[in-house]
Image: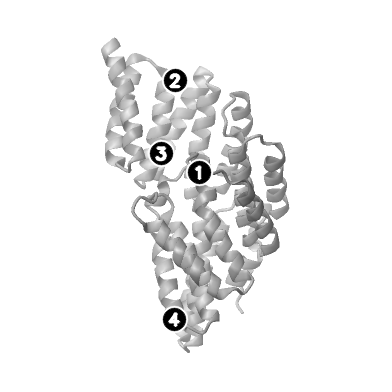
Amino acid sequence: HNLREELAYTLHDLANVYAGIGRAQDAWAAGEEAGGLWRELGNQPMLVDNRANSAWGRYHLGNVNEAVALADEALQISRTIGSLWGETYSLFTLAPLHLEQCDYGRAIDAIQEAIPLAQQANFEIAHVLASALGGVFGFLGKLDRSIQMLHEVVSTSNSREDRLLALTVLSYVALHHRRPTLAGAAITAAGEQFPADTSHPFLSISRVMAPVIQTEIALSNGAYERVLTLSAKGVQAAFQPGAPASNRHTVSADLLRLRGHALVALGRSDEAYAALNRARTEAMSRDSDRMSWMFLYILWQRRTTWKTLMALSEIETGRGNQVEAMALRAQARDYVMAVAEKIAQADLRSAFLDLREVREVVSDK
């Protein structure tokens, strides 16, 4: 019995190691073997952790429906044994899966349920979850609610990492709502608090997204040459040896999109088209981005996709290629409406469709 328990712990840890170095199939195999042993041994708390971890594993491999089933199993076991930590972790796992399925209502419900559970369990992700929820509401058009939630994290959290995350999310939400001054203030405040040691996992989104946000602010200010400089550095950094694979496609897609906009403004349409075409390819290449714990990238990738399609359409219009321009615009419109149709709550759907960025896509003009 003791030897089998030791083997289960070893396999459990090995699965985490494999996941950390990108060997998803090996992580899955080790996790499944460990899960069988935890069932055999009757260790329900470890089985909860195993099932939730395995859900992330299936998600990383693109098997979202299987991942949801595993996370649901972890949640049910947690509730049966009264594990607040297990419930929180299971709900934290379910949220990005529901977002991946465009089930925004269930994603919001999962986060809202997880926040008080995390507080009760002293699980240090309550403010992280609140920032994520603020980001979701901001993406869906509820700017005031998003700002309120993110400001509350900044004003109440004793964790510098939590405050940095909230400020970074706020800056991106502000850009989504065409509020560059608010975005600039938030990212500046974040930069003033950034620690020398950026190894903390919850700093990843701040570290990765800050260059994107700074580049989009530069674009909104008409600093096109600065956009070219920042975007080139950012894309190079995303793919340099040793850089984390997580989210490099979403980040590089956004930077290339911004670069394309700047090149259009500078009259360099051929270079702009090449940059935007690459942005479209990167935005569709999200396999490695599923490795991220921070699931707001899912939403931001969708924004990048429709904005890139619209930018390509504008270039084709300028070239006189009306058929191609209309086809690209139709792709962007279909993409946005597919998002809207999945928003079950009427008020959230209306708020999303009322976003200026969205209106520009769905308009017939």
Q: Residue at 41% across / 72% down in the picture?
A: 277
Disc tally is 4
Q: Which image quarter holds the C terminus?
A: bottom right
Element under disc 3: helix
Give the CA separation, mark 2 to mark 1: 31 Å
> Mark 4 and 3 residues: CB-CB less than 8 Å, in contact?
no
Q: Position of residue 154 (x, y in %)?
A: 68, 42
Residue drawn at 37 percent across, 34 percent down: 54
Tell which circle, 4 or 3, labels the residue nearer the N-terminal end: 3
Image location (x, y in percent) of residue 218: 60, 68
Tell which circle, 2 or 4, labels the residue nearer the N-terminal end. 2
Q: Earlier in the sequence, mark 4 or mark 1?
A: 1
Residue type marked 2? Pro
Secondary structure under tag 4 reads: helix
For this orientation, the residue located farthest to the bottom is 320
Residue 199 versus residue 360 in the image, above or below: above
**Marks 4 and 3, Cα distance to the nearest angstrom?**
39 Å
3D distance between C-alphas at marks 2 and 4: 56 Å
CB within 8 Å, label 2 to label 4: no
Residue identified by numbered label 4: 324
Residue type, mark 1 in image: Thr
- What residue did someone put label 1 on? 198
Residue type (three-letter) at the residue carrying disc 4: Glu
**Residue 113, quarter of the rendered image:** top right
Q: Earlier in the sequence, mark 2 or mark 3?
A: 2
Which of the image's four quarters has the N terminus?
Answer: top left
Residue at 66% from the left image edge and 51% from the top image edge: 189
Q: CA distance from mark 4 to mark 1?
A: 45 Å
Q: Which residue is mark 2?
A: 45
Three-letter amino acid code of the residue under disc 3: Trp
Distance of mark 2 from mark 3, alpha carbons?
17 Å
Residue holding disc 3: 56
